[in-house]
Image (cartoon, rainbow, N blue to C red):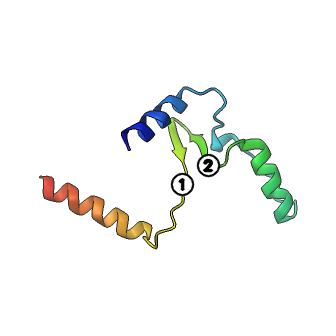
Amino acid sequence: MINKVYQIALKRNDPDLVDIETVKIDTGLAVEDRLRQYVGLIGNPYCYRSGDLVVNVEYSDKQTRIQGCVERIISNRIALQ
């Protein structure tokens, strides 16, 4: 896990990471063409910047929902206080 966080931190200084807020998609295009345009502009759709934040998207084969993950994080933080 720490290694993964470190790799993401290294990407933060990567000049090739595109800021998603600068990506403009032509909404007049068909959906498939918009997807192609998005990938062409963003480069790696799984790792990009949003302002100063590096976003690294990952998927899991587990059935865990994001709501459950957030609830666990909040519960753990409350328990640590």
Q: Residue furthest left?
A: 81
Q: Residues within 10 Å of mark 1 (few under 14, many from 20)?
A: few
- State whether residue 40 is above or below residue 17: below
Q: CA distance from mark 1 to mark 2?
A: 7 Å
- The residue lying at 75 percent from left, 48 percent from top is 39
**What residue would you read off at disc 1?**
58
Asked which secondary structure carries label 1, the reply is loop
- Residue depicted at x 64% and y 44%: 20
Give how far across and how far down residue 5 sits, in percent: 42, 39
Q: Residue at x 84, y 62 (%)?
A: 32
The answer to which image quadrant residue 70 occupies is bottom left
Q: Position of residue 47 (x, y in %)?
A: 60, 43
- Quadrant of the image containing the N terminus: top left
What's the residue type where badge 1 is placed?
Glu
Callout 2: few (<14), some (14-19), or many (20+) C-alpha neighbours within 10 Å? few
* Front one among 7 and 27: 7
**Residue at the disc numbered 2:** 46
Q: Is residue 18 left or right of residue 77?
A: right
Where does the image place residue 60, in percent across and percent down from the top left? 51, 63
- Going by the numbered disc 2, the residue's amino acid type is Tyr
Residue 74 in the figure: left or right of residue 62: left
Measuring from the top left, give residue 61's x and y in whole percent: 51, 67
